[in-house]
Image (cartoon, grey):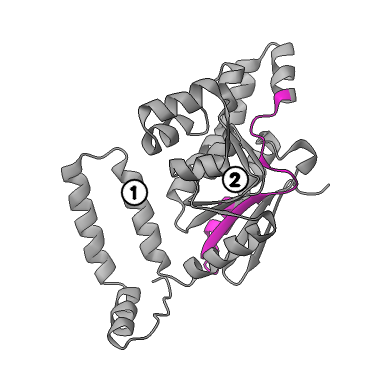
Amino acid sequence: MESKVKFEINEKVARIVLNDQENYNPLNQEIAKELLKVLEQLRNKEEVRCLIITGSGKAFSAGGDIKAFKESIEMGRPGEFMDDLLKNLYKIALILRQYPKPVIAAVNGWAVGAGMNLALSCDLVIASKFAKFRQSFSKLALIPGFAGTILLSRQLTWQQASQMAFFGDTYTADDMFKLGLVNEIVDPERLIDRANEMASKLASGPTLTYARTKKLFFDALSEPLINHLENERQMQIKSAETQDFKIGVFAINDKKEPEFIGK
């Protein structure tokens, strides 16, 4: 049976593909389990310095599996089913924010519900000009899951987040770009090439610096300013002791491009 989550590694970049295009790459139990396993596996590969996540077919990810939801209701165990499903999904939401390497979402088509929030959990989002986004949770009387309540409320105004969450309307790639939730829009045939270009540039950069920056961004969500400033100061001192800092300083001094090693 073909894997529902495929990945390949090429020149320090790992590309993860959600591979159930017949069902629009739902974030069901099977795919969640496979995706979590792949992320944990790649985390420990030193040669991988950047990740790309994309979907196959017409969707990035359609989010929740409606058929499975219906079956859980018919079996009289919707709460138990949701609990089982979310255990791995929420591990993925957390691991992406804490991932020690840059993660790029290459949104090729529909990104709905948890699928949209999977994209927003990545550090950078590149979208096909035909991509569509929707917070569909309210249509099912659910709250914006897969970290949606924090992703939306932290990145949009209260009113924008409320409108997106309450109405569950469809947003185009251009709409998302104007809201600041998409970094770049490209023609569909350029999507993966452009993602690879960005990933290659990041993979040749100071990846330890990226990891530390991501950690500070993450910690800033909950820490008081005075504590965060001290943590930031200490991290900068540690950064000055890295080999990459020396490489960067000497390269700029010699008017050359630095060749970072991630240490």
Q: Tell me: residue 75, above or below residue 58.
A: above
Q: Crowding at label 2, few (<14), some or many (≥20) Cα neighbours within 10 Å?
A: some
First-in-chain label (1 vs 2): 2
Identify which residue is drawn at 31% across, 88% down.
Answer: 254
Percent position (x, y) of residue 39? 57, 51
Q: Is residue 120 visible?
A: no
- Badge count: 2
Identify the image quadrant of residue 12: bottom right
Q: CA distance from mark 1 to mark 2?
A: 22 Å
Residue 57 within the magenta-colored segment of the rendering = yes
Identify the residue under disc 2. Answer: 36
Mark 1 or mark 2: which is in front? 1
- Of the pair 259 and 171, the residue shown nearer to us: 171
Percent position (x, y) of residue 159? 39, 26
Identify the residue under disc 1. Answer: 217
Percent position (x, y) of residue 4? 74, 45
- For the record, the magenta segment spans 39-66
Q: Tell me: residue 133, above or below residue 137.
A: below
Residue 95 within the magenta-colored segment of the rendering = no
Q: Is residue 96 visible?
A: yes
Percent position (x, y) of residue 36? 59, 45
- Picture disc at residue 198: none
Label 1 sits on a secondary structure element that is: helix
- 183 relative to 173 in the view: left or right: left
* Residue found farthest to the left: 226
The kind of residue tagged 2 is Leu
- 211 relative to 226 in the view: left or right: right
Identify the image quadrant of residue 223: top left
The kind of residue tagged 1 is Phe
- Of the pair 62 and 233, the residue shown nearer to us: 62
Identify which residue is drawn at 57% across, 27% down.
Answer: 169
